[in-house]
Amino acid sequence: MQNLSSGNVVNINSTAANTEKTTGMTKPRSLDATNPMNKVVEITPKAALNDVKIVKKDGTLEDYNVQKVVAAVKKSAARMMVEFTQEEIDEICDFVDKSVLQTGKKEIEIFNMHCIVENVLETLNPKVAKSYRNYRDYKIDFVTMLDKVYQESQRIMYIGDKENSNADSALVSTKRSLIFNQLNKELYKKFFLTVPELQAIRDGYIYIHDMSARRDTMNCCLFDVAEVLKGGFEMGNLWYNEPKSLDVAFDVIGDIVMAAASQQYGGFTVAEVDKILAPYAQKTFERQYAKYTELGLNEEQATKAAKMDVKKDFEQGFQGWEYKFNTVASSRGDYPFITVTAGLGTEEYEKMATITMLEIRMRGQGKKENKKPVLFPKIVFLYDENLHGEGKVNYDVFEAGIECSKKAMYPDWLSLTGEGYVAEMYKKYGRVVSPMGCRAFLSPWFERGGYEPADEDDKPIFVGRFNIGAISLHLPMIYAKAKQEGKDFYEVLDYYMEMIRGLHKRTYDYLGEMRASVNPLAYCEGGFYGGHLGFHDKIKPLLKYATASFGITALNELQEIHNGKSLVEDGEFAIEVMKYINKKVAEFKKEDGYLYALYGTPAENLCGLQVKQFRKKYGVVDKVSDKPYVSNSFHCHVSEHITPIEKQDCEKRFWDLMNGGKIQYVKYPLDYNTEAVKTLVLRAMDMGFYEGVNLSLSYCDDCGHEELNMDVCPKCGSRNLTKIDRMNGYLSYSRVKGDSRLADHKMEEIKDRVSM
């Protein structure tokens, strides 16, 4: 450690440029305008510091106290996840004291004190110096920022917010959360982003998702509920024993999900839930069987009665989840985006779990004769043609899934035996890559080899892993910028990809300094792979297998701006661009050692924001920015007059180019037609798709009549309807009691839908 206090006193007017290199670090010069020979200035005793006053910004005087410098320095260091040693703190104090004495003044302006502190921090740790400077600047323009937050808070309080369809902004708790999120978003932009990055998001060339949360925690995940339950766990400083029955397992899992999902943002998936619940169903059966035999029932009677009790517990358990996950908002203020996957279990209680869950969803919730399906948890059916084909062991489970999809749109369907990456992982290793939330998929991470398998016996791990965030490229804007500035498109694209890369790297570094205590269920109780850390351990070791997403939006509009043709009409340039982005992401992944992934962005509110940003820079361009929304991800434009089969074929071209996140869906122009739904789902499974059924469900809240896509009830004439539409990869209310949680531009997109 370089000694900063031995005569190397810096004049308060010096800058960071006035430095010289020494072994291992930068050392301030001993400069003084009144000492041209640069001789060491004789320092008076430190007792003289007792007479020094600091002139505050408001003109008042305050006694000089170096401990206030220490406090400010520690705060600046903490913001950068740096902790100075006591030796370094002592040297800072000695350096500042001597610099103050060198001025020979009894009153020192606060600005000059800041210069002294910055000089010493530039030497010790430039990142902390930057944090200190930023905080100073932040205090100067804090009033402006706070005013912006206040204006936004007023809008939220009295008008509401429709940026996230899972958040009901009519609720007080949600309003509070949204207002805090606005403040946190401004702090993120102020303290985490560079000027070029800030300019890029303001103009709209890139979009950083969830800026209000990404400094605090991770994004979507495949939470390992089974690992948490095994042997018991601690939650909220209380010990939970492992459940001994199915009904208790449902209650405890519900508590785990609500508690853990509140500590993150994005989708929260419980993978293969049928296999998680089955052991607890067996425990309930054994308990009930013993009870009935003690009551005098014979083996057959006791078995039948005990299984009926298990079935009843499944029904009540899944119904309880539907109530809890759709009515209890998380501490974030929204309804957590919870997904469950199921369908592969072939044992009796595994099959019973999946079929019962589907039956409960089909039945709906609500008053008698006025029931409708809920939105959460999103259900994903894991399809294996060797299990679910006609005549196979789980064909009855498959048929229950089809019946549920045609009535409730869920489950969505994930092919494990078709073509592509997800099926490859399943067929080769027997491991399921369940989606995190609506469409995000994890890249492989092997048990022993990490990025690559150590040998032929190495297996990939997916459950218990997570993503740290997504940043999306607005491809038509980048194309327009390149043309306007006379540059090569790929040169401009490279610039923004490198920008996203830098943001991801800093996010990995920042989150790695977090302590396990920020999310104990995940990091201490095994919810995440390797998550048995000590309460105060840093989570950095667990980030090695976390993915970070490069997203893309408006691929259809990119093709349009290139040659005036849609993805249906052409698509070759779009394919070329996606191959290029994949190649760059693979290079970044290899060079940086991070699991970057390419993601087809499910732009909800973003699809309207990007049009506004494009118009501001480049005006209204036909079929690019002439509508109030842009196309999501790699999907065909919703207004295309094509059949479901044509849409599947068109979007198949991009399927293997977005393995970090994707879904395919089509609009079914039919009325609860079982065979048609089955035919299209099976076709999608052969193609290797993650497939969504889109029907536009409508329910009259007055008489209970249900019909596809109605705006006025034909039975009673009421307009008091609940309508459920597919938002992107998930379902949302497009109408509730005459209102919607969706933004206007999204409602316009829904109105234009033909092929989606």
Image (cartoon, rainbow, N blue to C red):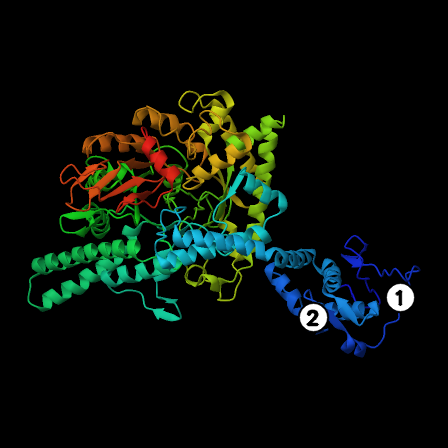
- The residue lying toward the viewer, choosing from 219 and 590, is 219
Compare marks 1 and 2 and give the one earlier in the sequence. 1
Callout 1 secondary element: loop
Q: Determine the residue positioned at 51% across, 42% down.
A: 207
Amino acid type shown at disc 2: Thr
Residue 681 image label: none
Q: Quickly name the residue at label 1.
A: 40
Residue 37 in the image: state x and y as whole percent.
93, 60
Report, in whole angstroms, how far the alpha carbon at label 1 lies from the one at label 2. 33 Å
Residue lying at the far right of the rendered structure: 37
- The residue lying toward the viewer, choosing from 733 and 337, is 733
Residue 160 in the image: state x and y as whole percent.
39, 50
Name the image quarter holding residue 641: top left
Residue 60 image label: 2
Name the image quarter holding residue 647: top left
Residue 188 in the image: state x and y as whole percent.
55, 52
